[in-house]
Image: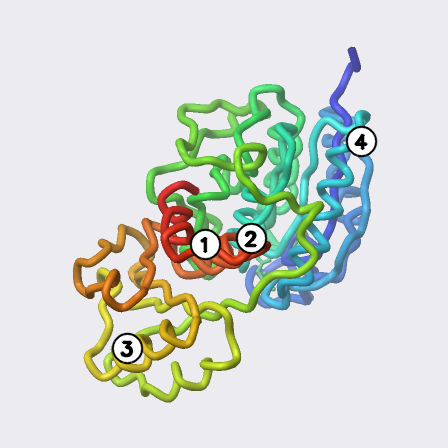
Amino acid sequence: MRDKPNIVVLGTGGTIAGRGASHANTAAYACSVLTIDEVLAVLPQAHALANLRTEQLLQTGSENFNNEHLLLIGKRVSDMLEDADVDGVVLTHGTDTIEETAYFLHLTLKSVKPVVVVGSMRPPSAMSSDASLNLYEAICVAGHPASRGRGVLVVSNDEIHTARDVVKTNSFKLEAFGSPYGPLGYVVEGQPRYYRTTSRDHTVMTPWSIDRIESLPKVDIVYAYGALDEQAIVTFLGNTDGLVYAGTGNGNVAEHLVGALRRAARDGVQVVRASRTGSGVVVRDGAQPDSDYGWIVVDDQVPQKARILLMLAMSGEPKERDALQAAFHRY
Ligand code: GLU
C-alpha cells in the first residue's frame, strides 16, 4: 500500500495556465502561458494529497482543439492509465471545450482508474481565482478510491460532474458548469462526496478504445435560425461524413431546409437532429418523419456532444443507421 496515491497531472493550457496584467483582470489575460509546473508551484498543498508527476502535453486554448488534439490527449492519458504505478490522471484544460474532450475520453478510455478534467474561469493571477482550488479538488477526486469506475469526471466550483452531462453554461462566472440532472457529487474539505452515478455506458463498457482509433470521420454542426440559408447545409455536402443539425426547440427544421437535409441523407451523410436549447430530448419521428427521411435524432446530447458521439459511432466498420441511432440512447 502506498501512503499517498500516485497522480499524473497533464497540462494542456487554458485559463488555468493564464496570466493577467493585474489582479483585477479576471476575464482579460494571456491564456496558456504558464507551464503545468508553474501552475502547481503556487499550490504546495497538492503534494500532501498525492505523489505528483507532471507532463506538458499541449499549451493552447481549448477553442483550438481539433480531432487530432482529441486523439493525442486520449492516447497519452491511456498510456498513463496503463502504468501500474499510476492511480489516477488529472488533465488541466481550457474550459471552453472541456465537455467535448471529457466526453470523448469518457467513451474511449479503457480503465476504471479516475480521470478528472479540470480548468478554471479566472487565471491564477486574478483576485479570487478558482485555479488553485479547482486543481486541488481535482487531485483530491482523482486520488480517491470512491472515484474509480465512474467514468471521466469534470471538477469545477466544488462540484463533480460526469463528462456525459456536463456543459459550460456561462461565459465568465465561476459557476460556469452545469449538468442537466445535477452534479454527481461535491468536493467537501478535500473529500469527494458522491450522491449518484450515471446510468449510461462509458469507458470499459463501450466498444471504442482510444488505443485503436487512428482517425475520426468528419462531423460538422449547423446551428439553426429562421433565416438560415439552405446554402449553409449544401456547402457541407461532399465535404463531410455527418451533420448535426442544432435545430430550434425539439430539433425543428424550417420547411425550406428539409430538402437539403434529405438530400444530405440520400448522399450518405449521417444527419442528426439535435436541439439548440441546451437541454431536453429530441423525439424521433416527432416534429419530422426521421424514419422516412433517413435521419437520426439525439437522445438528450447537446450538439457538441452529439458530434463527438457520432464520430465514434461512425468510426471503424461502416454502420447501419439503426446502429448509429441506438448509440444515442445508450451512451
Ligand atoms: N481560451 C480558453 C480555453 O482554453 C478560455 C477559457 C478557459 O480556459 O477558461 O478554453
Q: Which residue is mark 2?
A: 98
Q: Is residue 178 left or right of residue 292?
A: right
Mark 1 vs mark 4: give the one in front: 4
| Mark closest to the chain's N terminus, 3 or 2 | 2
Who's the residue at 80% across and 42% down the image?
41
| Mark closest to the chain's N terminus, 4 or 3 | 4
Distance from mark 2 CB to nearest ligand 1 atom below 8 Å: yes
Who's the residue at 59% across and 25% down the image?
148
Mark 4 vs mark 2: give the one in front: 4
The image shows residue 47 at horizontal and vertical percentages of: 77, 29
- The numbered disc on residue 168 is 1
Badge 1 crowding class, 10 Å Cα cut-off, few under 14, some 14 to 19, many 20 or more, is some
Mark 3 lies on a secondary structure that is loop
Residue in front for this viewpoint, 59 or 81:
81
Marks 4 and 2, how far apart in space?
24 Å
Who's the residue at 65% across and 56% down the image?
70
Q: Amino acid at mark 2?
A: Ile
Mark 3 vs mark 2: give the one in front: 3
Q: Where, quadrant-wise, is the C terminus in this rendering?
A: top left
Marks 1 and 4, how far apart in space?
31 Å
Asked if the residues shown at circle 4 and circle 2 are in contact, with their CB atoms under 8 angstroms apart, the answer is no
